Image (cartoon, rainbow, N blue to C red):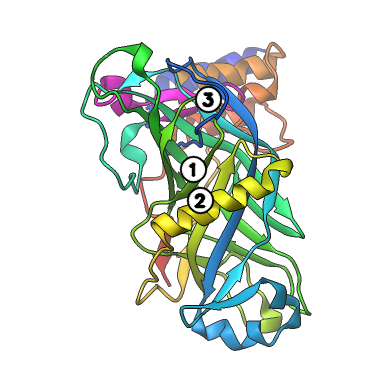
Amino acid sequence: MESLLKALRVLLTSRRLSFLPILGLVLVGLNGTTLQAQFPGRGDDVTPSLGQFNLVVDPHFETAIKNNPGYAPFLSNKGGNLNFTSPILFDPTTTIGRSDPLSAGSADDTAGVLAGDLAPHLLRDGQFTVRLSFAEGPDGTREVHTFIESIHLTGSGFEVKAGGQAPLRPLSAGEVESLSGNSGDPTLDFPANSFFDVFVEVDVPALGGFPKVQLVNVDPLLVQNESITSFPPKVLYIHGNSSAVPLYFYTDIPAIGIHRGDLFGQLTLAGHGVGFRLSDVAEFEAAETEAEVHHGRLPLQDNPVPRVHIVDEVLCIGDCNGGQAVTVDEILILVNIVLGSAQASACPYGVPSSAEVDIAVIIQAGTWTPRPPTKYWSEA
């Protein structure tokens, strides 16, 4: 005990602990049966969801993919390009964290607010790389900060993961903003628009002799919906980027000459049906078709970067809420874990999986230096 308190005194007196928030996100949407008028308080929404993606295979890999019979059921030729379309995927427990309501342009909006209870994250307005494609409300508009805590869509061996299911990928953060403008009237919170900057890991199963393929996006995929009426919703989120989003190989595949960071293709269509169950597949497909008719597919980039250096997330020891800093309060959480008065789950983003929290961890937390803001890739 004496050595623990001594280490803590040294830590708190010798080093200034800053609070520099980073990335966070959400998915929320329309619920056809329940209409809410006011944004609820901070919490988590757990809901089923369906998803599907389409990408155009880069010409460099077209021949290999076309000649592989295992890929044939998922290939089509549209617009003179080789399209690779996943089956419909399902996640029974998509989980979204949301903050208390706040006002756009406020101090809380700028400095950040905690979102979610299961795995709290500090979310601030300035962390978005890409913002929604339609007009946002003026300062003073009521809004909620959100983030994807967990997505794990699966089907026929395919997987799409985000949030805690893909811990080395950047956090997928978003926002829900009332369509009532700066009325200041909480009873007019809904309907609202919603968007996310999403970072995913896509796993394609071993097909036709090809090994399993893991793909990631290094620029965020913007998904959005212009009118949601409740948390959790039942709504289709569609892409909002101005052009297709490249997907890159996440791991080396020496057997076929693939290197981590090589371009596989460009994502042109991404639909995520939040609130949709397996029994809603026909409804989801109809919504996707309607969305494609009205919004089309994302145009291909003429010259996508052919190879990138992928930057993974780095665990910040002691950064319990994922805020990209270690605060005095978080140091005290670690102390309480050591003393047995708190569980390791009290620091979900600041303790390595299965690691024992001890004095060494506390010292490491106090000497951690935040990584400066950066892109999540560089050109190789």
Q: Is residue 314 visible?
A: yes
Q: Position of residue 214 (x, y in %)?
A: 64, 64
Report the quarter where the C terminus lies: bottom left
What residue is shown at x 42% (from left), y 28% (from top)? 145
Q: Are marks 2 and 1 in contact (CB under 8 Å)?
A: yes
**SS at badge 2:** loop
Label 1 is placed on what type of residue?
Answer: Ser
What residue is shown at x 67% (from left), y 83% (from top)? 256
- The residue that label 3 is drawn on is 231
Q: Position of residue 80 (x, y in %)?
A: 48, 83
Distance CA(mark 3)–CA(mark 2): 22 Å
Mark identifier at residue 172: 1
In this rendering, the answer to whether 313 lies above or below 164 is: below
Label 2 is placed on what type of residue?
Answer: Phe
Q: Earlier in the sequence, mark 3 or mark 1?
A: 1
Q: Is residue 17 visible?
A: no
Name the image quarter holding residue 74.
bottom right
Graded by Cα atoms within 10 Å as few (under 14), some (14 to 19) or many (20 or more), the crowding at tag 1 reads many
